Structure formats: structure tokens, C-alpha cells
Image: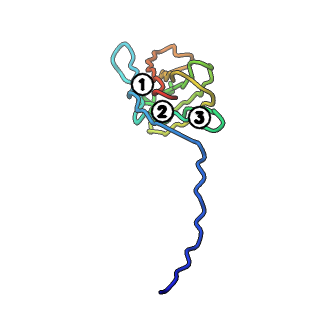
Amino acid sequence: MVGAAVAPTTASADTGDRTRTVDCASLYVSDSGGTVHARTRNCTVTWGKNIHDNDYWQTVKFQLLDDDTDGVCAKANAIASDSGKSASFSECDGVWTTKTATLNGRSSNIFIRVAYGSHSQHGKISTNIGAPSGF
């Protein structure tokens, strides 16, 4: 009988992080004449939590385009509804640009607003992404 030695294996530690990614709508803003000025695409919100220390976060990711390079930039905001924490983005060059922000804390939904121009004076549109169950 031949014996075999088995080396002990290192246990993989569970960090406690849990995530769920939710798609969100593509948005666009046009002026009263129908010319599109700002667009988003490939939008996701990744809802995260840590089951060990009860931390929560949301990572918002999308592409933003200033569709009409007329000197008025495309603007976007991602806002955590419960805490009011937010991130602001802009794109002025007519190139799809990936925008990402992580908002810390628990939130029941993320509000994404897209506009063009300062203070949304030219137009805006928004979408609201609710947290999945357990987040």
C-alpha cells in the first residue's frame, strides 16, 4: 500500500461583499426643435453591500455624449435618494465617454439626470433605478 501526503489547502476567506447589477435606461435630451444635445447609453447601477460590516454602496456607470458640439456641454448627475450624495459629470467634445461614480451608504434608489447647458436651462430628462431586494 502506497501512502500519499496531501498538503493542506488555504481556506478562501469570504470578504462579505455582495453585489447585484441592474441596467438602466438610455436617455437623451433634445431642444424644442428636436435636435438631440445629450445622450447616455450602457447605463448600469451596481448595488453593493458587505454582510460582515453592514456597509452599502452603489456604483453608477454609463457613457455620456455631447451630441451637438455647439459649445453647450452634456451634463449628468447621479444622486442617491436617501442620503442626497451625488456625482456630477460633463462631456463637451462629441465623444462617447465612460463615467463612473461610487456613492457610499444605503439608498433605496438612484436618480440619474441628464441635461445640457448650465443649470439645465436648456432641457433635462431623468430616470430612477430602485434597489433590488436585499440592497
Is 106 drawn above or below residue 11 in the view shown? above
Quadrant housing residue 82: top right
User: To which residue does mark 2 refer?
Assistant: 45
Is 3 drawn above or below residue 121 in the view shown? below
Q: Going from the N terminus, do you reach mark 2 or mark 1 first?
A: 1
**Residue farthest left in this picture:** 34
Q: On the rendered structure, is 108 left or right of 32?
A: right
Q: Quick one: 45 or 4, which is closer to the camera?
A: 4
Q: Nearer the observer, disc 2 or disc 1?
A: 2
Query: Separation of disc 3 and disc 1 at Cα?
Result: 26 Å
Query: Separation of disc 2 and disc 3 at Cα?
Result: 9 Å
Q: Quick one: 25 or 120, which is closer to the camera?
A: 25
Query: Separation of disc 2 and disc 1 at Cα?
Result: 23 Å
Q: On the rendered structure, is 41 left or right of 59?
A: left
Q: Secondary structure at mark 1?
A: strand
Neighbours of disc 3 within 10 Å: few (<14), some (14-19), many (20+) = some
User: To which residue does mark 3 refer?
Assistant: 102
Q: Secondary structure at mark 3?
A: strand
Marks 2/1 in contact by CB < 8 Å: the verdict is no
Marks 2/3 in contact by CB < 8 Å: the verdict is no
Q: Position of residue 98 (x, y in %)?
A: 49, 39
Tell me how many marks there are.
3
- Residue at left 53%, top 21%? 108
Q: Amino acid at mark 2?
A: Val
Marks 3/1 in contact by CB < 8 Å: the verdict is no
Query: What number is the disc on residue 37?
Result: 1
**Residue farthest right in this picture:** 53
